[in-house]
């Protein structure tokens, strides 16, 4: 059940405080870290809450779920796809999302580029990397990241903002720490090698946002800490 807006606001304030504390520890400015509200499985009103609170965008895992919600939203907000995207849904994703974070193959790059070209738009994307080498997670392998980035940069209708990763589920906090540090190092190396900024590092969720921010995350994807357990 969706909480009241007041409850959501209180939780969002709490998450903001966590972000600020982690930024203080890492000598960063809290404005460098965006809070992305993850609204999957929640009604359209959840996106309205995020907009009312002043967030720029919400994250959704499934294309069709977002397509069904968007007409029912009463406020304007950005939509980012953070879940796995099949190539046959690329055109729909290009129409309905302001950014796709889960791009992990050359095939998907090609489909999104073609869809964006047809729409006459430049589609922002993130390359999803399996930085934790978790067989249960999607994402390109670390070794394939240079080739994938090179391919992405050659696509005229895509704008590569940076990278995204999901840490493996583990009771050991060092697993997430290593995952996030690996992606940060990879980003820094590739930004230097290709001469592109790759500013965005989308990493960290409700349970590991502090480790992500300490490693350099620029966007944390938060669902349960804002809306409660599904």
Image (tube, helix red, strand yellow):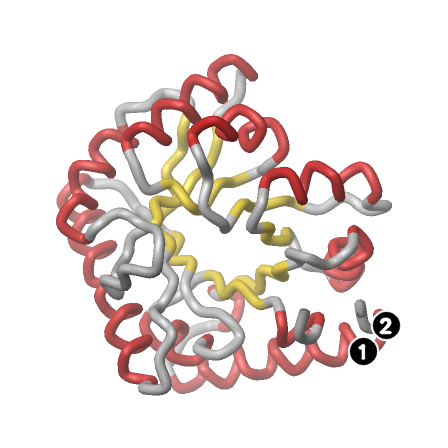
Tell me: residue 93, above or below residue 35.
above
Q: Residues within 10 Å of mark 1 (few under 14, many from 20)?
A: some
In the image, which disc is placed on residue 4?
2
In percent of width and height, residue 3 lies at 81, 73
What residue is drawn where x is 69% and y is 75%? Answer: 228
Q: Quadrant of the C terminus?
A: bottom right
Disc 2, SS: loop
- Tell me where residue 172 sits by quadrant: bottom left
Residue pointed to by mark 1: 7
Disc 1, SS: helix
- Tell me where residue 23 sits by quadrant: bottom left
In the image, which disc is placed on residue 110?
none
What residue is drawn where x is 40% and y is 53%? Answer: 200
Q: Please, which residue is most extreme toward the front here? A: 136
Q: Quadrant of the N terminus?
A: bottom right
Tell me: residue 45, above or below residue 211.
above
What whole-number distance in Å separates the C-alpha atoms at marks 2 and 1? 5 Å
Residue 80 vs residue 91, the one in the foreground: 91
What residue is drawn where x is 67% and y is 43%? Answer: 66
Q: Residues within 10 Å of mark 2 (few under 14, many from 20)?
A: few
In percent of width and height, residue 137 lies at 35, 58
Asked if marks 2 and 1 touch (Cβ < 8 Å), the reply is: yes
Q: Is residue 211 left or right of residue 37?
A: left
What residue is drawn where x is 63% and y is 61%? Answer: 37
In percent of width and height, residue 82 lies at 50, 50
Residue 208 vs residue 215, the one in the foreground: 208
């Amino acid at each position: 059940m969706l909480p009241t807006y007041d409850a959501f606001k209180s939780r969002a304030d709490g998450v903001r405080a966590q972000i600020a504390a982690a930024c203080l520890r890492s000598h960063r400015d809290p404005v460098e870290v965006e809070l992305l509200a993850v609204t999957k499985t929640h009604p359209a009103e959840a996106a309205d809450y995020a907009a009312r609170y002043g967030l720029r965008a919400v994250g959704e895992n499934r294309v069709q779920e977002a397509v069904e919600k968007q007409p029912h939203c009463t406020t304007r907000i950005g939509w980012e796809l953070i879940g796995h995207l099949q190539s046959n849904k690329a055109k729909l994703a290009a129409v309905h999302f302001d950014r796709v974070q889960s791009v992990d193959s050359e095939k998907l790059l090609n489909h999104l580029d073609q869809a964006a070209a047809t729409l006459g738009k430049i589609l922002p994307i993130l390359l999803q990397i399996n930085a934790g080498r978790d067989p249960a997670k999607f994402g390109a392998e670390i070794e394939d990241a240079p080739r994938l980035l090179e391919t992405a940069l050659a696509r005229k209708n895509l704008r590569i903002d940076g990278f995204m990763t999901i840490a493996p589920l583990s009771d050991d906090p060092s697993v997430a720490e290593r995952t996030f540090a690996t992606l940060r190092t990879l980003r820094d190396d590739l930004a230097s090698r290709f001469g592109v900024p790759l500013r965005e590092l989308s990493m960290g969720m409700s349970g590991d946002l502090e480790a992500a921010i300490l490693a350099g995350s620029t966007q944390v994807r938060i669902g349960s800490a804002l809306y409660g357990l599904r």
